[in-house]
Amino acid sequence: MGSITDAIAGSVGFGAPLGTLVVNALVTLSGGTPTG
């Protein structure tokens, strides 16, 4: 589940945990469901 967010986080340059939180926040604001 976290592989996609980890990949995005890695490409952006964040650490995996921080990147996942950022992605989840953006997804939640967009009205989606956080993948964690």
Image: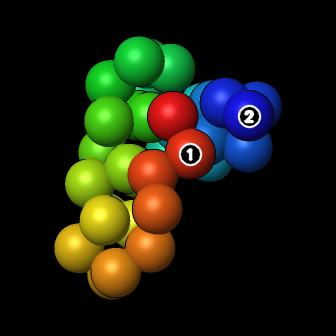
Marked residue nearer the N-terminal end (1 or 2): 2
In screen coordinates, is 1 left or right of 16? Answer: right
Contact between marks 1 and 2 (CB within 8 A): the answer is yes
Q: In the figure, 15 relative to 36: above or below?
A: above
In this view, 16 is above or below 30: above
Residue 10 image point, x, y percent: 60, 32
* Residue drawn at point x = 56 percent, y = 45 percent: 35
Secondary element at image label 1: loop
Structural distance between the alpha carbons of marks 1 and 2: 6 Å
Please name the amino acid that badge 1 sits on.
Answer: Thr
Which residue has dot 2 on it?
1
How far from the left and from the top, in percent, is residue 5?
61, 41
Q: In this rendering, would 8 be left or right of 16?
A: right
Q: Which residue is mark 1?
A: 35
Name the amino acid type tagged 2.
Met
For this rendering, which residue is in front, 19 or 33? Answer: 33
Left or right: 3 as drawn, with respect to 2: right
- Secondary structure of the residue carrying tag 2 is loop
Q: Is residue 11 visible?
A: no
The mark found on residue 24 in the picture is none
| Quadrant housing the N terminus | top right
**Image point (46%, 62%), residue name:** 33
Does 16 appear above or below 31? above
Q: Residue at x 33, y 81 (%)?
A: 30
Label 2 environment density (alpha carbons within 10 Å; few <14, some 14–19, many ≥20): few
Query: Front-most of 6 and 2?
Result: 2
Q: Identify the residue at the far bottom of this view.
A: 30
Task: Please determine whether, in this image, residue 29 is positioned above or below residue 21.
Answer: below
Asked if residue 10 can be seen in this view, the reply is yes
Tell me what residue is drawn at x 50 percent, y 20 percent. Answer: 16
